[in-house]
Image: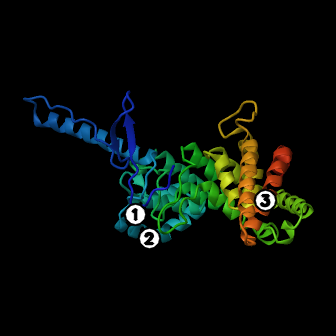
Amino acid sequence: METMHKEQVKTISQEGLDGSTIYEWDPWNPPCPPRCAIPPNTDMNFQTKLISEWMGKKDELIATARATNIIIPDRTPEWVNDAFYSTLPRLVPILEKDSVRSFLRLLSQEGKGMGWGFIITPQTFTQMMMQNALRCAKLALEGKAPELHGYRANPNCMNRYGYFPLHQASELFSVDMIKLLFDYNASANVRTAGAEVTENLLPLHVAVEDTCLHKYLEDNAFPSQEDLDSDCANNNYICKLIHLLCLPEMKIFLDTIRLLAKHTDNLVDELWYYIKDGKLVQAAVLLLAAQKHIRTGTSYEGKVNSKSNGFAITINRIWNHTITLESEASHNRENDKGLEIKIKLTRISLMLVRAVSLAGEVLDGYIQSYPEV
């Protein structure tokens, strides 16, 4: 899904058999069901019944559309969000205990700002993600409790800050919460948008970038000038980087990324962006965690071949990129240090991809054999 500005409205197109667009509609305000014709000479009670039935169908259609489609941007009015903050001090301890009964009681009695427009508000659901309240999140996603009055949470509704529930769960590396969101059709291909976030980030990006903030990696994994000086130094650096990622403490991070990668489209392209930008640590994290999906494609379960093998595609891209950079360097009369570093990083990335291509399956099995730390 392409990033959209926070003021834009996500629409859904319906196509005719000839491929022409029949209409577009906003999933927050879907088209109403056709009004039923009221027969002449009917009494007021019967007319009221027909109108009531139509209103019920309309409300159900709106509630379903708002709970099951990708909603961009957040439509919650400011006064509802303000009301939520008055409820937040009572909500936090409930979510800390992950008490479904207490949550329903609060929602029924004084849950201002927790539900609006036929859904659990994005701000409320984001708070569940932040506190990893699995039972309450499942209750909200199901929407079956009588106290909810048909309201439920939408796992694909952007919040006021420009990100989605899956981004928050990915930031916390909550594998169980991520699995729950996927069970209710959360999309791994939604991107951040708006002035209050770094734009265009997938949940996968959040997990990869936050993994690189781990102290082990921050202190030891990023290449120094010495690591770039020779082939021997390159080899030593790659071995050190892979060793760090295979430590037991990294398991939860790689497990999270592996799960997200399974549901993310164009995974090989996301890997290539890291390599092209010279982000070796991010590329290594994604390579090692998602090697299975890179090797075979996220939806491909058959025999590996050159057309589907993401490693072969990536290696070919690196070769072409290296040729382009070296050609640029040969025509550059000035000693461009930045270009020289780019060439060295690209060569190291080639060695890294080849190493994971050869040993990735064994390393992945080794990492997954660890108990959770």
Measured from the top left, where is residue 172 in percent x and y? 64, 61
Q: Residues within 10 Å of mark 3 (few under 14, many from 20)?
A: many
Q: Helix, strand, or loop for circle 2? A: helix
Q: Nearer the viewer, mark 1 or mark 3?
A: 3
Query: Which of disc 2 and disc 1 is earlier in sequence?
Result: 2
Residue 303: where, in percent of width, then height?
Answer: 75, 30
The residue that disc 1 covers is 113
Label 1 or label 3, whichever comes before in sequence order:
1
Q: Amino acid at mark 3?
A: Met
Left or right relative to 40: residue 275: right
Which disc, if any, is residue 250? Answer: 3
Residue 211 occupies quadrant: bottom right
Which mark, residue 151?
none
Say which element carries label 1.
loop
Please say whether residue 373 is visible from this viewpoint: no
Decide: is 228 above or below 42.
Answer: below
Label 3: which secondary element: helix
Q: Position of residue 200 (x, y in %)?
A: 54, 59
How far apart in space, not on screen, are marks 1 and 2 (Cα)?
A: 8 Å
Can the viewer see residue 62 in this picture?
A: yes
Gap in Å between the C-alphas at discs 2 and 3? 36 Å
Are circles 1 and 2 on residues that touch, CB within 8 Å? yes
Looking at the rendering, which quadrant does residue 77 occupy?
bottom left
Q: How is the image coloured?
A: rainbow
Q: Is residue 213 above or below residue 306?
A: below
Residue at numbered disc 2: 85
Q: Which amino acid, by three-letter code, is at mark 2?
A: Tyr
| Residue at the image point whose x is 74% and y is 46% from the top | 316
First in residue order: circle 2 vs circle 3? 2
The kind of residue tagged 1 is Gly
